[in-house]
Amino acid sequence: MEATSFISTKVASKLLKILTKVLKSNVDKRNKELVRINDIFGNCGELAKFYIQPNCQQVNPADELEDETISTIRAGVFETINKFFHRDIITRDGASQMFILADAGMGKTSLMMMLKLSHLMAFWPNDYQCQLLKLGATTLSDINKIENKTQTILLLDSLDEDNQCKQGGTDKRLTKILEATTCFYRVIITCRTQFFPETAESAFNTMGKISFNSYDCPLIYLSLFTNEQVDAYLEKRYPRRLKFIFNQFDDPKQYDAKQAVKNINSLQFRPFLLSHVETLLESHRQGVTEYELYKGLVETWLNREVIKLRKHHDKDVNKEDLLKACVWLAETMQRQSTHTVALKHITQLCHRESRIALLKDSADRVIEGIDHIDIGTSSLLNRNSYGEFRFSHLSIREFLIVYGVELDIIRDNNPFNKTDNMLNFIKTVNQSKVGLFFNKKNGYLLTGFKLLDSHQLAKMDLKYASLEHSDLKNASLSKVNLESANLHEANLQGADLQGANLQGANLQGANLQGANLQGANLQEANLQGAYLNGAILDNANLNNANLIEAQLTTFLEVETKQNKASLKNATIQYADLSKANLEGADLTKVCLTGAKLHGSLLSGANLNMAYLNNADFKSSDLSKANLEGADLTKADLSGADLTEANLIGAKLIGCDLTQAHLTGSKITDSQREAATFRHYEHEKPNKIAS
């Protein structure tokens, strides 16, 4: 190993031996720091014993699944970090502050621990110090107390668990952290990939970088384990015994483990789940979902704990009691944004009246049982040196909250913060038990929901409901209340929304092709970029709706005809339909007073007797449109294409027809005289003809 190397595979293999000696010593000053790491981050000895170095990459692994043609270059994460530590950096504009992103259970915290252990066991160059901190309320003050910053590498773990982000906003919090750490030699910040809000998508515009304000920071993603890395882990977990080596046989345990992880598909490549392979051997089933896998993990662990409690401690505790206690612990930590809960605190809260029906009959028994849980290497619930309880991984806590709601142990009436991982679990639960996640303020949580039958949501009040990215094709939602619901990019193709209340709903990018929206209330709804091809909007109220770039017609090659939207008698006052596609649409008697249709496609549309006064049709295509009897008083048609349009009987008083194309249109001289024709762009309109 070179003298300038900070971390390497060779270091990882030597750590366990030295670590074991240090842990046995009560004198070594490093022992105290190891206790702190164990309390906050996890078991150092267990980590060093089975650790496999992951790879890293500049492309988000989730994007690879969407586009398999992406050629991703991967490198060992130790090698990449070493290069980052040794790279010459002149400016302090984020170049010295690296982000490592990965999904739940991918090894972010383990990597930070390995870096710290490498320093603590004296494998680092002597000139450099290392500080490992879990991001939280005291982070900034802790950073300020660190001495010799220019020669210190600062490791900041779990930005997504930092409650300060929730209180003041991620951008603001992150900017403060970056400002406070610019003077350090190097900084590494870990975070879950999906933590950053959608408004921060621009931060990821450049591959290998993440940008916030004036900071451009290097960015890498942890890769999923390869088959070789999975095998390497299992070979460490189940080393071949001599009798199998000499006889050239496979070790049965190792073989069974490899077969078990193959049955959980892509989940096998997450280090956290691999670390519980023994439990997977007991509980895995072919084709299980991630939620079911966690359920098996927890069920198997609880069964094992109950047996041990009854056998060795003579405690009459059942699995249901322990599960309730664990769910309660998880919810308490989530609501209080903490990673630990003391037994004393548990006792106090269990004995006072609670808003949730939990542990009322068996609190003493459960508390006594939980106090005797065997905190071993495979336990999902651990205790630190202060006796406080903490879950072995955040994803276990997240699962238990969702599972607790499913079992009616806790309820979502008083909403708690839901992480992306929890939302994924909730999607699974919603497939069989709709309506468990609900509160009066936020409505039903049905993100990513998929209908089992068309009438599944027909009788529900879906006001404020979260239905983004849901598959509601052919749903029966007639007269359903969807006020202010979030239906962003939902599939509502062919849905019956007749008379539905969609006031203020977010339908941005939603697929409403062929949907029946007759008489629906779409006031102030966001339909930007929505697909309304062939939708029936007769008598619908679209006042102040946003229909920018909405598609309301399409050409069907098979049928060789247009699939036209119908908006007869619809009210669309002051709505924004800029660049909307309304080609051939039926807009008979539609009310578009004051609406914005700048650059819209209305070729061949039927606007007979429509109310179009004060509407903005600048640069729109109205060729061959039927505007007979339409009210275009003071409408702006400057630059519009009205070739072969029918304007017979249309009111054009004060209508701006500057540079409009009127070739072949049906328009009378008296109509021309009533309209406005400016010679210059900034010329004031001429007087309205009387």
Image (cartoon, helix red, strand yellow):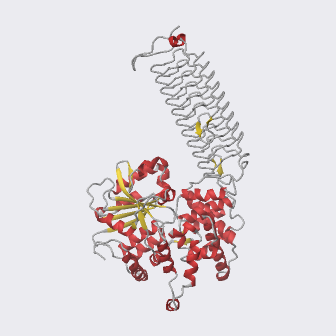
Residue 37 in sight: yes
User: 620 or 21: nearer the eye?
Assistant: 620
In the shown orientation, is residue 600 left or right of residue 437?
A: left
Q: Nearer the viewer, residue 469 or 344?
A: 469
Asked if 689 appears above or below 466 in the picture, the reply is: above
Residue located 64% across and 82% down the image: 312
Quadrant of the image containing the N terminus: bottom left
Residue 437 screen position, x and y as percent? 65, 53
The residue nearer to you, when weighing 2 against 249, is 249
What residue is rendered at 27% in x and 54% in y?
91
Q: Residue at x 50, y 91 (%)?
A: 242
Total tally of numbered discs in the picture: 0
Looking at the image, residue 203 sits to the left or right of residue 104; the answer is: left
Residue 375 in sight from this viewpoint? no
Q: Is residue 588 above or below residue 420?
A: above
Res. 79 image quadrant = bottom left
The one nearer the camera, 511 or 41, is 511
Q: Residue at x 57, y 68 (%)?
A: 265
Quadrant location of residue 299? bottom right
- x, y percent for residue 598: 50, 29
Q: Position of residue 138 (x, y in %)?
A: 43, 59
Query: What percent of the width, then of the height, locates residue 199?
Result: 47, 46
